Image (cartoon, helix red, strand yellow):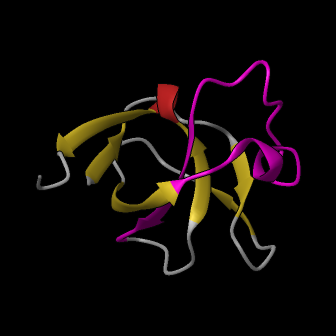
Amino acid sequence: MRVKVVRTPGELRDEIGHKIMVRKDWQGTVVRELEEAEMIPAGFHPKRSDRVYLVRFDEWDQPVAVPAASLVILEPDPV
């Protein structure tokens, strides 16, 4: 599904460890939703975070874990 950042989540790390600032209005494609065991290494507390998605942004080639509260769906997954 295609998503857009509506709330800047702050400094995050991509899959290979680069620190990046994800910007408001960035758009990207959700690779997948993180499972609970993957959330802590990605920097999120599984009991405090609803959903966290791995997103490949058009502006950044490596997938980045972003909380769902910072995103809005532009195009849902085809059924």
With respect to residue 17, does 67 lie above or below?
above
Q: Residue at x 38, y 32 (%)?
A: 6
Q: Residue at x 50, y 25 (%)?
A: 69
In this rendering, position of residue 7 left or right of residue 17: left
Asked if residue 30 lies left or right of residue 42, the reply is: left
Which residue range is magenta in the image? 33-58
Q: Is residue 38 above or below residue 48?
A: below
Q: Quadrant of the N terminus?
A: bottom left
Q: Position of residue 74 (x, y in %)?
A: 18, 43
Q: Residue at x 58, y 45 (%)?
A: 66
Rendering coords of residue 29 (x, y %): 33, 62
Which residue is most to the front?
Answer: 79
> Which image quadrant is residue 9 in?
top right
Q: How many marks?
A: 0
- Residue 21 x %, y %: 63, 54
Residue 39 vs 62, above or below: the answer is above
Percent from the top left, x then y, of residue 40? 87, 44
Please say if 29 is above or below 7: below
